[in-house]
Amino acid sequence: MRTIQFREAICEAMSEEMRRDKSIYLMGEEVAEYNGAYKASKGMLDEFGDKRVVDTPISEAGFSGIGVGSTMTGNRPIIEYMTFNFALVGIDQIINNAAKIRQMSGGQFPCPIVFRGPTASAGQLAATHSQAFESWYANCPGLKVIVPSNPFDAKGLLKSAIRDDDPVIFMESEQMYGDKGEVPEDEYILPIGVADIKRKGNDVTIVSFGKIIKEALKAADVLKDEGIDCEIIDLRTIRPLDYKTIYDSVKKTNRLVILEESWPFGNISTEITYQVQNELFDYLDAPIEKINTADTPAPFSPVLLKEWLPNSNDVIKSVKKVLYQNS
């Protein structure tokens, strides 16, 4: 099977869907002439033209609103944000229009739109460019939220998101665009709302998603050498959340560690912790451990940033804690 970059998987997904359906178009800052800020739309302007690959002014509220409005006339837009930090300027259009228009119109107007771009930290980008927004958008009924961790999942899930009749938040990472992975050349899609077990194990369940799952995989390699067998679940979709895969794993391992690149208050790991203890209390042999960033804005200093972000050592410590192996 061929190996391609994450950005290429994104580009292929959009291009294949645009060839299939002429109502689909891409709009955002630098998506056309510049081939995308991260080159995720490379070559698309040449193939589809400037009516379907549209450069915009720096006005997220404006082009988000245009995208939402165009769904009511039969279009299926893909709206790219250079970063979801900038989506805060257009969040009114996402939350108050895209997420609610189907209900407010009594089902007369579906809203088949994908909002995509990078989320969370990406090195020394400081406090206003390093925020994780998955839990913000997952909190809103009417939105689906997807955060893939590799090129294969990204392509299959983006194609499903584009075909979905509801608004989808599709979150990537600047630090993943160059990641390589095996992606089939043949047509495939992946179902929204289904987690994936990246590594099977029997001693402890580790749940994560997005780029930070790499730290869980690193930790699992180290722990394997120490005789600790970790099962790693990649959520892939944040809403709807695949509770069943988590529950089935915890029933087997009896221990749960959740790794998430976000602030610790009111996030996805908080929700999972509540649901697991509520549904599977008698299966748990240890309190659930959740690993998050420090509860501060992201620092610019690389020394402080290293302390702020969770890493594989944090995962190892938490796994040993739920196994009562801490000395």
Image (tube, helix red, strand yellow):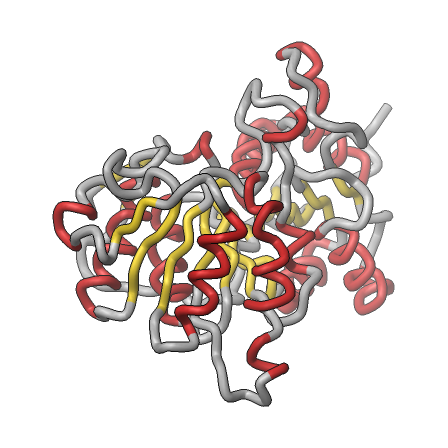
Residue 182 in picture, x, y percent from top left: 28, 44
Determine the residue positioned at 70% across, 45% down.
258
Residue 67 in picture, x, y percent from top left: 43, 62
Q: Looking at the rendering, in which quadrant would you find the C terminus? A: top right
Q: Relative to 122, does residue 90 appear above or below in the rendering?
A: below
Residue 104 in picture, x, y percent from top left: 63, 82
Q: Quick check: 248 left or right of 323?
A: left
Determine the residue positioned at 32% across, 38% down.
36
Q: Is residue 181 visible?
A: no
In which quadrant of the rendered view does residue 213 lie? top right
Q: Nearer the viewer, residue 245 or 105?
A: 105
Q: Quick check: 133 left or right of 86?
A: right
Q: Nearer the viewer, residue 173 or 277?
A: 173
Determine the residue positioned at 50% across, 88% down.
108
Q: Nearer the viewer, residue 291 or 92?
A: 92
Q: Quick check: 327 left or right of 173?
A: right
Q: Is residue 153 visible?
A: yes
Q: Quick check: 169 left or right of 128?
A: left
Extreme residue toward the left, this view: 47
Determine the residue positioned at 54% across, 30% down.
218
